[in-house]
Amino acid sequence: MCFRSKPVTYRIFTIRTAKALKLPSIRAIVAAISSEIRDGSEVRERTVISFENVAYNYGGGELLSEISLRLAPGSFHFLTGPSGAGKSTFLKLCYAELLPTAGHVTIFDREVHSLSRDEVAQSRRRIGVVHQDCRFLDHLPLAANVTLPLTVSNREVSGQDLGDLLTWVGLRHLADAVPPSLSGGERQRAALARAVIVDPEVILADEPTGNLDWEMSLRLLTLLVELNRMGKTIVVATHDLNLIRQAKAQVPARVLRIRNRRIQLAGADL
Amino acid sequence: MIVKTVFTRLLGGDRQSDRVVPPSGHTAWLTSFTAGAMTFLAVFALALSLAAGRMAERWSEALARTATVRISAPPEQLDLQTRVVLDVLATTPGVENARALSDEEQRKLLEPWFGPDLPVEALPIPRLIELTEATDGYDAEGLRQRLAAEAPGAVLDDHTRWRRPLASAAGRLRLLGIMSIVLIGGATAAMITLAANAALAANAQVIEVLRLVGARDSYIARAFVRRFTIRAFGGAMAGAVAGMLCVLLLPSAEAAGGFLTGLGFTGFGWLLPLALPVIAAIVAFFATRRAALKKLRGLT
Ligand SMILES: Nc1ncnc2c1ncn2[C@@H]1O[C@H](COP(=O)(O)OP(=O)(O)O)[C@@H](O)[C@H]1O
Ligand SMILES: [Mg+2]
């Protein structure tokens, strides 16, 4: 395969870039943020998200069927499949934007159908989501959008840490810009910063590198790997095989593939 | 208590929540205008019902405390029966005083109908005795029976017959005023609900983003509720002040008497219109909250 030797090159390149930019470690940033916003009342569950014989349809034919899987705390999964296979749908089931039409989805040991609306909101504060279409509040500056998950739960983060986080995703100079003026890649990085700022236990990223150049994709991957090493559960929907290879070199990531409405664990051939 | 809830909700709640919803153009204007116009009308309805209330009270009071005994008898018996009736009244518990009207006074009463030159003495006009009740009142039926026994020509007229319709007309006018205020309140709630729904629809995307980052319904609702309540309060305050100014500037033609000049506020009554903006704020608070929570429950 032609790209077998590439990852190493890129990895070195990434490290060089990070050093050249004098980036603070994301581990330090997230640790600093978490010490500010944690209230100490949270209990960590054994299973983060689990699917039991789940099916979903948008009203027409079944899009996903017989899905049973369990995301252990601290695991790293990629989700692949052709466009339209239901990757985004799967992620939406993971944070209760959609409810399964059959079977049971359990988030932090609670069946989603049994959650009240406030409990759904509460669960979402423990899950950082990078949406494929990166929706923002267009009237607020980028910095306010990134801190929005804290704002809605009446928490705050210091300007220093916010600055570090924005620097990490390369958006510090755009802190005061409004989202409509950002490029696709900038929006995705902002969405990632917004997902990370709550110090979530789970991070769901829907094609986060779709609009990013390779260098930025790698930086983002490094961030996800770093977060995973801190114990966070990560699911990344992508069809970027290079990215998957790159990650597998750094963490024991598993690959889930959607095929014929089912989700399978992909073999080592990938 | 409701007022306290509203204000702690609004002022105690963070202003941050206000910022997450973009400032909206025409719904803001519509809300303030509606609240202002409706409060302006409510000030007049309030003035009307207060004036009607005062009128009803005045009439009942004035009429309830006096009564008349009319003595129709042949001229030779008239003086005798008048004396008998006065004696009876003097010994009736609950009658404060009684007094026969002089010829002069009777002529004055008849003057509007027959002119000044009426020879009262020469006509078989009944003699009138005016009595004033003590505060406890007297037993009208008992008095009637005693009079019938001792002075057959005497008839007690205690005004209830014509006092009642007058007082009840004034009472009904007051009720109309109160009903108008309630209707104005209902119309304001309806208009604000429409405006709030328009604002919620215009901000569907914002609401979606807020839900996705873990905002509770109550947080999202508060952003709208706070805004609409403040607008309604501001508009209503302007409407109330304008309405009060208009009432203040009504011509006060005391001499002309009658109903219209009674339409002002008196004393502490001037504070009542100032309660209207608070009521408008409460109405806006609950109307917006209801609309917002209903809308939000429809989303995932
Ligand atoms: N809200 C919706 N209503 C109806 N069909 C939808 C909706 N969202 C997605 N779909 C359909 O479901 C299928 C899977 O969509 P999606 O989960 O976004 O796929 P992927 O992310 O893998 O590209 C697509 O065919 C898409 O057209
Ligand atoms: Mg998708």
Image: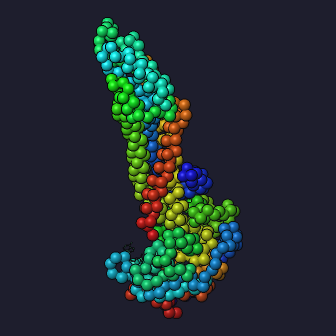
Residue A148 visible from this viewpoint:
no
**Pick the front one: B59 or A85:** B59
Identify the residue at horizontal 43%, vertical 61% (top origin).
B295
Identify the residue at horizontal 53%, vertical 72% (top origin).
A119
**Pick the front one: A54 or B120:** B120
Residue A10 drawn at (x, y percent): 60, 79
Residue A35 drawn at (x, y percent): 70, 70
Q: Splitting the image into 4 quarters, where does residue B18 fall? A: bottom right
Tell me: residue A120, above or below residue B276.
Answer: below
**Pick the front one: B12 or B6:** B6
Residue B34 drawn at (x, y percent): 42, 43
Residue B116 visible from this viewpoint:
yes
Q: How is the image coloured?
A: rainbow
Residue A216 drawn at (x, y percent): 57, 72
Q: Residue furthest bottom?
A: A268
Tell me: residue A203, above or below residue A145.
Answer: below
Identify the residue at horizontal 52%, vertical 84% (top origin).
A50
Tell whether A80 sits left or right of A109.
Answer: left
Identify the residue at horizontal 41%, vertical 55% (top origin).
B197
Q: Splitting the image into 4 quarters, where does residue A194 fall? A: bottom right
Counting labels gives 0
**Which image quarter is the C terminus of chain B in?**
bottom left
Tell me: residue B138, above or below residue A54.
Answer: above
Tell whether B3 sits left or right of A29.
Answer: left
